[in-house]
Amino acid sequence: MTTAPPTGRRYRPPAPLGGRRRVESPKHRTAIAAAFLAPALIVLGLFTIWPMLSALRLSFTDASGFGEPEWVGLENYIEVFTDPDLLGAVTNTALYTVLFTPVAVAAALGLALLLNNPRLPFRSFFRTALFVPFVVSFSVAAFAWSYLVDPQVGLLNYWLRGLGIQLGNVLEDPNLAMPMVVLVAVWKLFGFYFVIFLAGLQDIPTSIYEAARMDGAGVWSRLRNVTLPMLSNTMAFVLVFAMIAALQAFDQIYVMTGGGPYGSTQTLVMEIYESGFRKLEIGFASALSYVLLVATLLLSLAQFVFFGRKEKDLA
Amino acid sequence: MKRKTVLIGGAGSAALALLGSGCSENEVGGPATLTFWHGYTEADGDVLQGIVDDFNASQSDITINTEVKTWASIDDTLLTALSAGEGPDIVAMPAERLPIYADKGAFVELTGFYADDSSNTANLIPGAVSMIEVEGTKYGVPTGFVPLAVYYNTALFEAGGVTAFPGTWDEWVATAKQLTVDEDGDGTPEQYGVVLPDHATVANGLWPSLFYGNGGDIVSEEIDAVIDSPENAATLEYWRKAIVDDKISPTGIDGVGADELFGAGKAAMTIGGPWMASIAAENGIDCAIAAIPAGPVTQAASAIGVSMAVTVDADDNARAAAEEFFAFFLNDENAAAWSLGSGWPPLRTDVPAEAVNSNPVVAALTEIADLGRPLLPGVVNSVDVLAAVDELTQRAIAGEDIDGLLAEAQETVQNAL
């Protein structure tokens, strides 16, 4: 229903609340925008930009956290690229990323597709349950998992022993420790990706599915030709987020394995932590952080370019 | 010597304070309130608090406030706290961590304090003092120094028919075999004779102790890597056979896991520090203490050390006040009280054995105190050295080629040094 303007005299729209309408100059608008943005910008500047710039400066020094650091130029960066011990950390980080990203994204997408079905009973309950691990602190989750897989007192070991399966000491096994810390990360983080996928799925107009159905498309065909292409933006976002999370893996590794057994879970961020807080080589740790930052940026950029092209192809 | 005259109070309190506290080259110039971080969380923490309270009460100018944290938390937060100027004035930490902070300038030199006759440092155990030195300069005061020892379950010994504690490695392994029980014959014993962690061992000292026993070492006095030696190779071969083939100990376990296994009554012997006596008591285990049996060459044990230091956040007045406290902590009365209360042997060699006989744990540990060797004294980058030792022992027990592993470890340790 529409409401017609009163007749008999010329219609004037009501004045905005707060009295007469002000004519705002662009300068005035900019000032208002700046005022609204200021709190966030101040927080961002103080707690993100300034520490980043400070770390950049430190990366060119021999800073230890005490006394006046001395300028060492590119020495720390040269060490980052020539230190043979770092190769293990780079390999482990790559392995972690390769294991974590597809598994977490596939699990999130699969469950999002399943729980997007309106006929599924207890849908809201399952959705909430899957998101809960994301709300739990990573350290708490890691402690809980450590106890679960403990060879002496762990419930998981106990249950599996009942089925005749000897899990052994997973966190002390160099072949199993990495998959284990990846599994914990997947359990902890996939709920977030799941919610993003769910939102993406709900944005796809049902009319497209109806049209596809009328054209005789089956479930698999609809998934391949409608769902996945329409989710490409969401997919790019989730993949980039998952990859960044993988490259920054630290919490559960610190708690569960400390980088062991014999370095098999020592990632780059663990290396940064050890260099900075155990060996007090803040300059080197800062340089390593910047190398990781640049690598992350480049990888994210590559993914966005890839998905951007795919979207163009679809268009 | 510049005698410190701290107290302005009444003659009685001044006399009391000077009697208990020592002196240093600095003088306390006025009231000082100091923060002291430490990780003594058990009964030892109560005793330390008692000493601090006594010190605070003994004079009117200096107040020390303690903040109890875990040792790991101290290590994680000290750098950021000191960088922000919010750090403690005094901090206690595992002795092997002290050199790295000292080397980076986090701690104040205590050379003058040690030179002072009234600092009560003249008779400190030399090994304990060596752990607070970096390139000949002293940066701390020891609060604990105790050799690793074998803590054994006397009930399991009795049930296994073992009447005497072994004196040599061969006897030790034979005893451990006797006490290892695999009731169901599935190849996994329900009770182990001993629990020997292959990494992250208590105070990182188990494998150094075994290396010493066969005449080996990790780092020489000249701070050179000496880990790749035939002696260490023989040690690793010997214990790999005992652990893996004879199954006297579980594999792939760390120090915390070893404590748990012993506390659960599933291992007859473990290697540890004084707190094992408390763990045993809490779990209703009758426990006795013995020295780590002698190796083919000698009998020695890596020592667990804890030291306290004055941080750069302390101003001159606070530094002088901290030195007052250190001298008080090390005086005759407190040296014995701290030992008795904490369960650690006396830090001073001139504390008579009778003074600590009332605590059986201290008495037993004092008897074997001479076997204690400081772990990596003067080594700044202990992080990488200990990580290399951990990797070596873990991979050796897992069955990898020992000679190759030792060569790798030698290179890593030398690079770290």
Image: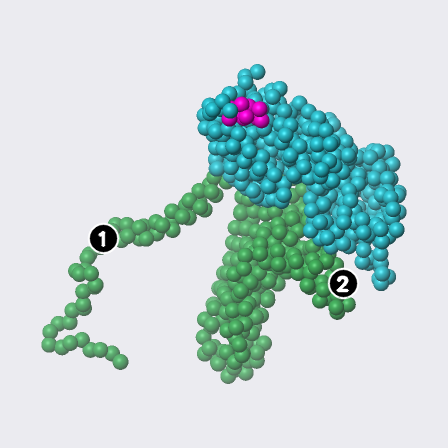
Chain colours: A green, B cyan
Numbered badge on residue A25: 1
As shown in the figure, which amino acid type bears the numbered disc 2?
Gln
On screen, residue A133 above or below B354 = below
- Give percent across and percent down for residue A147: 66, 58
Dot 1 falls on a residue whose secondary structure is loop
On screen, residue B89 above or below B183 = above
Q: Residues within 10 Å of mark 2 (few under 14, many from 20)?
A: few
Q: Is residue B14 magenta?
A: yes
Q: At 76% across and 63% down in the image, what residue appears? A: A166
Q: At 71% across and 49% down in the image, what residue appears? A: B281
Specify the subunit that label 1 lies on. Answer: A
Q: Find the magenta span and give its range.
A: B13-21
Residue B230: in sight, yes or no? no
User: Which residue reaches farthest left?
Assistant: A8
- Give percent across and percent down for residue B291: 80, 39
- Give percent across and percent down for residue A37: 35, 52
Where residue B143 sits, quadrant-wise, is: top right
Numbered badge on residue A166: 2
Marks 1 and 2, the one that precedes in the sequence? 1
